[in-house]
Image (cartoon, helix red, strand yellow):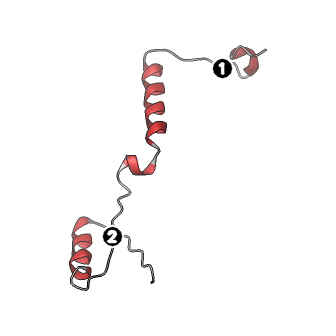
Amino acid sequence: MEIIIINSPNKVVTQKIKDFLEPLKVPFELKSESKKDEVYDPEFVKMVLKRSANAKKGKVTEINPKDVWGSIGLK
């Protein structure tokens, strides 16, 4: 078995490629890079969105670059 990777520029080209491969009974997989859920772990996305919402509400921790450890209460 050999693997061929094709980066289709749009849905029209993708459909033409599918139409070509189906009668030949060539198995293929479609993967979309445009879906955020496929690119990032869902738990990570959930965490980032939660932190973003907290930041909009003003729930943030300010860090003093001259005293990083003291700013986060670890000094």
In the drawing, what numbered circle is on residue 28? none
Image quarter of the N terminus: bottom left
Precedes in sequence: disc 2 or disc 1:
2
x and y percent of residue 42 in the render?
A: 43, 41
The number of callouts visible is 2
Q: Residues within 10 Å of mark 1 (few under 14, many from 20)?
A: few
Image quarter of the C terminus: top right
- Give the Cα distance between marks 2 and 1: 45 Å
x and y percent of residue 18 in the render?
A: 24, 75
x and y percent of residue 55 in the render?
A: 47, 21
Label 2 element class: loop
Badge 1 is on which residue?
63
Q: Residues within 10 Å of mark 2 (few under 14, many from 20)?
A: few
Task: Give me the residue at 70% from left, 15% from top.
Answer: 71
Task: Give me the residue at 42% from left, 23% from top.
Answer: 53
Please, what is the three-letter code of the amino acid marked with disc 1?
Ile
Q: Nearer the viewer, mark 2 or mark 1?
A: 2
Q: Nearest the camera: 65 or 36?
A: 36
Badge 2 is on which residue?
8
x and y percent of residue 11 in the render?
A: 24, 65
Task: Work out which residue is located at the far bottom of the displayed protein and give it.
Answer: 24
Q: Nearest the camera: 62 or 42?
A: 42
**Up-down relation of residue 49 to residue 17 (above or below):** above
Please, what is the three-letter code of the amino acid marked with disc 2?
Ser
Label 1 element class: loop
